Amino acid sequence: METKKDSQTIAEYIKNWSRKHSLFVMAYGTGCGAIEIPATMTSRYDAERLGIRGAATPRQADVLLITGYLATKTLKRVIRVYEQMQDPKYVIAFGSCTINGGMYYDSYNTINVLEKYIPVDVYINGCMPRPEAVIAGFKQLQDKIARGDADNGTRYKENLDWYRANQQQVIKNWRMPDYNW
Amino acid sequence: MLEQEQALLSQVTSAFPVKGKVMRNRRVEVWAESTTVSSILMYVKNQMGYQHLNHITCIDRIEDTKFQLVYTVFSHQTKMTLFVKTFIDRNAPVMDNIDHIWDQANTYERELREMYGIQFPGLVGAQEFILEDWDEMPPMRRDFKTEEYSEKTFSSLPGRENTQDVRETISTRSGEEIPDFAKKYSRD
Amino acid sequence: MSITPVHYIAVPLAAAFLIPILSKFHKETARIIPGLVFSYFLVISFVLMRQVSNTGIISETIAGWRAPWGINLVFGYFSGFFATLMSVIGFLTWLYSYRFKLVDSKPAMSYYILLMMLVTGSIGIVITGDIFNMFVFLEIVAISAFSLTSFYPGRDGAEAAFKYLLIASFSSFLILLAVLLLYTQTGTLNIAELSTKVHLIPQSLKLTILVMFVVGLGIESELFPLNGWAPDAYSQAPAPVGAVFAGVVVKGGIYATMRVMFTMFDINEMGQILLILGLITTIIAEVAAIKQTQVKRMLAYSSIGQMGVVMMAIGIGTEDAVFAALFMMFNHAIIKGLLFFSTGFLLHNSLTKTIAEMKGVAKKFPVLSFMFALGSFAIVGLPPFSGFWSKLYFLMAAADAKLFSMIALVLAVSIVEIVYYFRVVGVMYYHQPDESLPTKQPGLNAYFVMGFLAALIIGVGVYPDLITNFLHAAAYELTHKTEYVQTVLTQFVR
Amino acid sequence: MEGLAIKILGAVITTIVAFAVGMTYGGITRKLTARVQNRVGPTIFQNFIDLLKLQSKKTNIYHGVMGHFAPMWIITAAITVLMFIPVLHPGTAWYNSWFPNLSFHGDLIFLLYMMVFGSLGMALGAGQTGNPNSAIGVTRGLSQMVGFEIPFVLALVALMVQYQTTSIQDIMTVQRESGVWMMFSNPFSFLAALFASLGMFRYSPFDIVGAPAELASGPVSEFGGKYLGTMMSGGSIFAFIKLTLYVDLFLGGAYSIPELLIKTFALYMIPVFYGWVNPRYRTEQAIRYFWGWPTALGVIGLLIAIF
Amino acid sequence: MNTLALILLILFSGAIVAFLSEKVSKFLPSLIAFISITAAGILFYTSPADVFNFKLSMAGLNFTLKIDEFSRLFVHMIIGLSWLASMYAVGYMQNKERQGTFFFNMLLSIGGMLGIVAARDLVSFFVFWEIMTWSSFLIVVWTGADFRRTGIWYMVFSAMGAYAMLMAIMMIYSDIHTFNIDEIIAAIAEQRLPHLVEASVLLLFGFSVKAALMPLHVWAPNAYTQAPAAYTAIFSGVLSKMGIFGMALVLLSMLKFANPADFSLVYINGFIGQILAWLGAITAAIATLYALIQTDAKKLLAYSSVAQLGYITIGIAIGTPLSVMASLFLAVLHALFKGTLFLAMGAVERQAGTTDMTKISGLIRRMPWTFFVTLVSIISLAGVPPLAGFVGKWMLYEALITNGNVFMVVVVFFSSTAAFLYSYRILFGIFLGQEEDDTAHVKEAPLSMILPMVVMALLLIALGTYPGLLFDPIAQGMTVLGFENVTWQMTVLSNVWGNTVNLMYISTTIGVAFVAALLFLTLKGRKGSRNVGTKDISTSGEIPLEHENLTYQLDFFKPFERAASPLYRRKMTKIYDDLSNGLDALFDFTRKIYTGNGQTYALYVVIFLVALLIYVQNTL
């Protein structure tokens, strides 16, 4: 891991530095975690000091926040949003539900493992994680970016078939546009 | 004591061949045949001022092969709630559509249709209401094996121990006993 | 035998006498002989007009009785203009209606004779030099007109004819009274001589006579409020007769008014009244026209409106104004003729003759509709059609007389005219046709008549000099009466 | 030839200064806003970092030719307007010769129209993306522009009539020579223009155009990466342009860069402060706002200027 | 034969031939129209300037036709635009019914317009005016939709205008007994004509109708919308300019030379000018407001035309050299860009079937050339540099400001800012937004339709930098109007205060900046560039289905409409409707005089006789 950072060219280093310090967040407010975002962004925890600010649309966003359990119906939209984001893009998943189902482990319409459908950079565990944890998660993501191994978009592209297979297993009536980047 | 409630009950029972009882303060329930439910509702809405349909809910009495439907109506004048309860056959679940009495009944009925598979003849609305692309048994029926389905469809990562009772872990960590009354809710 | 004005009267009278006899041998003679007469009218007009342009006003005495005692006929530019116009319209009407009556069960004979008499009477009015004769011819016209109005059997025609009769009897009465008064005062009935003697009449009596003439002739020339008979008569008579009413009968009335006002008396005495009457007539008629639902009634009111404008021009009384009035009458005759003719076939099978029944006729009768539209464009005075020039000359005459408010009113009324004509054109062109109505396509003769009129409208519109010189001469002759008086009176002296 | 070189140099330097100042002002605003809200806030150079990041996005989405042209139109309009704005009074300082650019060849009315050029490009680009939010944002923006344009034009016409010139350079010169700034000689017009500037900067309460919560940031909602970055740069330059224009017209212009910075910063803080304490207006409320008191003030100012 | 007469003859006889040739082939009328206009154009441009002089004495009137420098400007517009439009019409009218009528009237109205600008006497002016009016009326009702609202209103308003003119002509005639314009001007300079002021007002009224000035504009939107696009271009582009031509004739040629000793006249002249200018300004503002709530592109453009004519009127009415120049410049420009826009809308209508913006969207990829010309014209219309529209707007503003019409400037500025709204509306509504399956079959219009539009668009671009190309003929024309020594430069605009705008610098700067940005943005990161369709948008993760069109089209400027609701409350059409209903009732009342009863009529006769006798005996 450390080696990758050292092998960066100057240009890459600058790029990664800027990416690290400017994270536009697409907060996909699923589940209970959405309520933690305002706390993180506002006065008490002030994520903006780290260069984190909200983005209104996936086109402008760098980070996709999945803030809790995902119903299959929601998953479709999440995939759509994720695919609309521009590379480089990052995904942060909140809470137990995104890791392995959490308390919805036996629900008939809630996915258990987010990783199977879209690549995730950072998991923040907890049910729900508190803003401190969220900021810690962001910090981790920043480190990862600075190291140059936050390759979420590339991973998705390379393993698109696997992801698609998983997605289509859940989303039966597949009516999604093709992923073209 | 509860004169109002009694009066209500007697009014309904006198008008329809139903039996019922006063549950408690401002709560009255009646049991009706499924065919008379819509007329009872019409009657209480138009004649007795029960203008508000709170809810329609369904209970899966799998043991009796019946669905129990509960219509909750409320009067703004007397502040009383009337529960109209009925059973329908679980194997051929058909119930009268009442969205001509209350428009909002449409929403509940669509949900019941989707979650329990109860048919309401004449119900207008998209087939898929909450679920998307659902082709299994209606999921709220008790014979639907949700855990199996979940395991099959959204396979978990290894390491999850489904049977683990979190309370035991807590009690061992904190040294607190699980009270007796709570033990009977234990998973096994 | 040289052609003289008396042929205008003698030939048709002889023909009218012959027709019942000849039709015993061949049924078609009743149809053909009037045509021959009308053709002969054309020849007479042509020859006499040549003669007038060479030698000046022709005055002819009949049966050797010299004026002022005998009947004399005077044919100058002014009379010639009217006579020619009437001949042409008469001929065209005959040609147009040559096969028109075949669809009717009623025998056609009386129609053609009446038509012939109508035109003959009107021509008689314009060529006579004798005021009593003028009255006689007016009566001939009126009687023919009643008959034509009630030509179609039925209550409406009879009612219209009765109204016409009622009102026209006032006219006859008043004119006769006026003639009588004139004769008692001056001892002559010759117009030329009268014009030299009217100053002998006491002023108040003269005015009374004038008023009688105004009212009596006003009925014939459709002045408001004396024109109640006109719309009914127009709409009940057969369609081609409408053209004759507009192009011939009314012209006779106007001619008489002009002759009386200009030659016998001085126009300045009654000019103001005529002007105001004309204006009111125009306004009321156009306003009434816009509310009509029947096409022919609408055209009738429009005719009245036009005559009102003519009357205004007469009321102005200058040479230019007379010129404008003549031009306007010419245009009115040909354009109204075209409109009536085209309407005749457009609404041939309609019972009610309403505008609504003309829906989409353009699809069935493209040429006829085009003719109607052309007539509409011309009659509202759009250049380059002939109607424009007469309107322009009228306005110039009015402007010379500084009658600006009158110009404004006439122009405002013209907008109303535009609305109702264009509304009909819109109905014709921009509605879906009612396929159920049976149609009757006009024959070649009708096409020829309408084509001729249309060509005349456009031709005069593009090159008004076709007619203006002639009209100028006529206007000059009317407003400078000395030549007329002298010609007639020298004959008298001789 | 040397003149041309100086011109080009001046143009480049002016652009860089405008860009840097605009971006930094944006950063300062963010920082100050954070402080007002009892937050730490980002660094004042956060906008530069954001821009760098946007420009270094790996994929960019091409929405069609107008979407491609839109950022270019914005930056073109920004640079063109900048070239025709006198940034400083002609002076003797060593850097003075860099800044006049082409300001002798354009006048106020040209600038007014040129400033729209960018918005038009933006609107077209936003339209082509096919996102309904973009179109809604554009219509709101255009409507609001009609709102604030009235007091603004009233003020500018008053200015032009008062000084009998339409050239910005001349207006600056007159103010310098008379020693009385426009904002004192005709305070009503200045106030009208100031109110108009609130709408022009689109800070709250006039930020309905790109309201993130309801319109998904409006016109720019389909733009990301280099397109968004370029738009940001253009916007920053425009901020500088508007401020400099106001300073030139109403505050007598500036002799030196520090003076310019002080004056522009003071002006800039007005919409920012106003925004902190105000919620968001709906479009029609915003328009009505501008057509109310600001217009009345503008009319008074114009009457003063005439008589 | 005289060249001018020959040109008119070619057009008029071409009209008749075109009308008749429809029987032979459907295609022929359009071809004949094109050929006759081409022939007329060739004849006009190959003949020396001094031959356009034609005198005819007919029916006791002297008709004089002469093309002077001022008319020449309009002749350029008429022939140029008509030529392009007739070229366009060949493709546009393909497979349509009743082409003969259309081209007959088209050629007739073109001939009429040429006659108007060439006329040097009022009668021939009026004759050609009326020919133009009714032929354009026939085209307006050619499609036959809504005959009453469109056709009758147009004709009634035109007739009102024309008859006002006729009245004025008669007033002048009654004063000096001539129709010749040169003689009238000479007479005005010498003596005081008693009816000059009334006549001028009436003439201006007549011209205002054609120029669709505010209270008289109600015919215009419908008429412009209903006429086929190939003709609407001419209609809005040059035919409406005849009103402007007339205004210039009255205000600048006639009244300006009024006897300076006649103080009241001079005063009234300025007063009339101010009133007219204000009417123009109000027209511009209100028509703009109505334009931006339209959903039909042609109707929007129709209202926009009304607004633009308002600007042009202002310039003429103010009457300073700069304003007149601005006005004439705008007039030519309006012919160019509105001509292009109407033609482009015609292309859209032909290819996509409708111009209703709520029904079509996203045609940019299907009709790129049409979009390009529309874009160029819209930028010109909005007056955004560096295209030609800016030049006209600039001159107009400077003229108004330097002339002290400050409040008018604000009104004009308001309307031209609001014009951005509808400019965007039309671009967005038709060409941008989401692509639809319904319009997937749409193809670009044929070359013969594209070519005229592109020619005009290129002219607009060229004039943006080199307006001097147009200033030259305008300045020459203004010499005739009495503005001698109007200075102009090829690329520099200047006002009387000495402020200048150098268009060369502007275009260069824009060009350099744009090319730099283009290179930067296109080359940078082009590997990662991804093409997406218009359905691929961020709609909160929702995926629009194929048949779902999310384009925002209805109630486009609703917030603005709400904010400006007081301005929308009163509608001029309603006032006219009330008026016509009232008149109708009055007419109905009057009609009742004719009761249909013979006795009543007889009574009338008797009463009339008695009344007349009493009157005559008492007064005369």
Image (cartoon, rainbow, N blue to C red):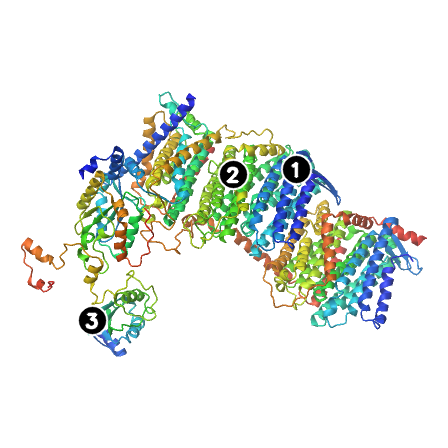
Amino acid found under the numbered disc labelled 2: Leu
**Which quadrant does the N terminus of chain B fall into?**
bottom left
Task: Name the disc covering residue B139, or none.
Answer: none
In the rendered image, residue B101, in percent from the top left (x then y), is placed at 33, 69
Q: Chain of mark 2?
A: E
Query: Viewer-proximal residue, E597 or E529?
Result: E529
Task: Name the disc covering residue B61, or none.
Answer: 3
Residue labelled with disc 2: E458
Query: Viewer-proximal residue, E46 or C16?
Result: E46
Task: Name the disc covering residue E67, or none.
Answer: 1
Q: Height in image: A42 above or below A31?
A: above
Residue projecting furthest to the right: C494
Nearest to the eye among marks 3 and 2: give it.
2
Mark pair 1, 2: CA separation:
28 Å
| Sequence-wise first label, 1 or 2 | 1
Amino acid found under the numbered disc labelled 1: Ile
In the rendered image, residue E157, in percent from the top left (x then y), is placed at 59, 50
Q: Is residue C73 left or right of residue E460?
A: right
Mark pair 3, 2: CA separation:
80 Å
In the rendered image, residue E525, in percent from the top left (x then y), is placed at 34, 39
Query: Viewer-proximal residue, E593 or E30?
Result: E30
Nearest to the eye among marks 1 and 2: give it.
2
Q: Is residue B4 left or right of residue E491?
A: left
Secondary structure category for the residue under label 2 = helix
Mark pair 3, 1: CA separation:
100 Å
Whether labels 3 and 2 share one chain: no
Secondary structure category for the residue under label 1 = loop
Residue E167, visible in the rendered structure: no
Q: Chain of mark 1?
A: E
Q: Is residue E463 left or right of residue C101?
A: left
Q: Are marks 3 and 1 in contact (CB under 8 Å)?
A: no
Q: Are marks 3 and 2 in contact (CB under 8 Å)?
A: no
